[in-house]
């Protein structure tokens, strides 16, 4: 068994595809596939489930993944202790529902980059269920997701609360609703509504707020960033956590404004999640700690 075999299987797991892993590792796909199969034959288990949509860890592979990661981390420590000059670049993958991007995510990435100049960070926009599945399967190291207060945390995932906010209505300044001190559910029924797609927490919240009633016209989109852009272009209003709007460049420039929701006491939590495991890459640990520090330094809304 060779160290590079373990590195290859970790890359395939992280990227979810033999082709993408081969591109990143600068190998031919047949060569990578043969290396993985040799490791599977040596271990006597199928580490991957190969499908048309890509390669994912098998059940046996997921059980062995912490040991694979542990071996790679041990090799890194050994090299460092031996005084080798190799600076090994590791990629940290962060799944996000695009919440608190400007006030939290961007400053944290800037701080992390300064401390880890050779470690790549890949930020992937996805729905909450996709992020949590990726955490469990090893495709993501960290996840930023929204929870409504009282939501359950899935098994196998460790959660840390970063921010606590409230839902607000995001509007253009020239919207009739912007003249109100607060916007009610009935007010939202009379304007085009830009809703998050099914699978996002704010989709569930808006459905509950409107009690199943449909607005005059609605769009659906993925994530807060696209929602805010659509608002700024005059397509309608959207409902987002306040920490996704306050301090955003569009809000600072006056392209969008926000209003509280009449009589609503719902709290939205921004959670930092990672897989429950005893073996976590050092870079992922450091980025996790940077998120926690960054959240503590933000002023309360």
Image (spheres, helix red, strand yellow):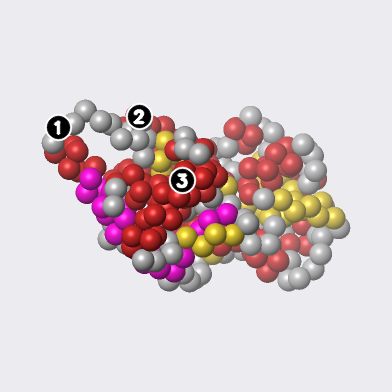
Residue at x 52% of width, y 48% of height? 18
Task: Give the number of the disc on residue 117.
Answer: 2
**Spatial separation of the CA atoms under disc 2 and disc 1:** 19 Å
The residue lying toward the viewer, choosing from 239 and 273, is 273
Among numbered discs 2 and 3, the one appearing first in the sequence: 3
| Pointer 3 local density, CA inside 10 Å: few below 14, some 14–19, many at least 20 | many
| Mark 1–mark 3 CB contact (< 8 Å) | no
Identify the residue shown where x is 26% and y is 48%: 73
Residue 280, x across and y down, in percent: 31, 53
Q: What stretch is highlighted in magenta?
A: 54-75
Pinpoint residue 135: horizontal percent, then vertical percent. Answer: 45, 58
Residue 151 position in % (x across, y down) = 51, 69
- Mark 1, residues whose alpha carbon is within 10 Å: few (<14), some, or many (≥20)? few
Residue 207 colored magenta? no
Mark positioned earlier in the residue sequence (1 or 3): 3
Q: Give me the C-alpha separation between circle 2 and circle 3.
A: 28 Å
* Residue 90 visible in the current orientation: yes
- Image x and y of residue 185, in percent: 73, 62
Q: Can you see residue 95?
A: no
Q: Helix, strand or loop at disc 3? A: helix
Q: In this view, does 210 lie above or below 296?
A: below
Residue 298 image-quadrant placement: top left
Helix, strand or loop for disc 1: loop
Residue picked out by circle 1: 83
- Disc number at residue 32? 3
Circle 2: element type: loop
Magenta span main SS:
helix
Say which residue appears at 57% left-offset and 54% top-offset.
54
Residue 55 lies in the magenta stretch: yes
Vertical relation: 64 (above or below) 287:
below
In this image, 160 relative to 210: left or right?
left
Q: Nearer the viewer, residue 258 or 28?
A: 28
């Amino acid at each position: 068994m060779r160290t590079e075999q373990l590195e290859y299987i970790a890359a395939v797991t992280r990227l979810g595809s033999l082709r993408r892993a081969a591109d990143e590792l600068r190998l031919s796909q047949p060569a990578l596939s043969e290396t993985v199969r040799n490791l599977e034959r040596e271990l006597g288990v199928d580490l991957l489930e190969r499908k048309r949509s890509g390669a994912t860890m098998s059940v046996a592979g997921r059980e062995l993944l912490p040991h694979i990661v542990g071996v790679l981390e041990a090799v890194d420590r050994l090299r460092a202790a031996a005084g080798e000059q190799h600076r090994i670049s590791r990629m940290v993958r962060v799944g996000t529902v695009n919440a608190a991007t400007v006030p939290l995510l961007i400053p944290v990435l800037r701080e992390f980059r300064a401390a880890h100049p050779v470690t790549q960070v890949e930020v992937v926009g996805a729905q909450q269920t996709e992020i949590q599945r990726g955490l469990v399967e090893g495709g993501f190291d960290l996840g930023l997701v929204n929870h409504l207060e009282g939501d359950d945390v899935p098994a196998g995932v460790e959660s840390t609360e970063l921010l606590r906010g409230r839902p607000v209505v995001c509007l253009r300044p020239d919207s009739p609703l912007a003249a109100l001190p607060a916007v009610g559910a009935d007010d939202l029924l009379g304007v085009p509504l830009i809703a998050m797609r099914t699978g996002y927490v704010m989709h569930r919240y808006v459905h509950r707020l409107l009690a199943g009633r449909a607005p005059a016209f609605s769009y659906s989109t993925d994530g807060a960033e696209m929602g805010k852009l659509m608002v700024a272009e005059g397509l309608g209003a959207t409902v987002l956590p306040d920490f996704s709007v306050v301090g955003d460049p569009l809000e600072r420039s006056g392209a969008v404004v926000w209003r509280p929701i009449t009589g609503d006491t719902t709290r939205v939590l921004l959670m930092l999640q990672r897989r429950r495991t005893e073996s976590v890459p050092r870079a992922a640990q450091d980025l996790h700690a940077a998120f926690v520090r960054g959240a503590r330094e933000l002023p309360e809304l």
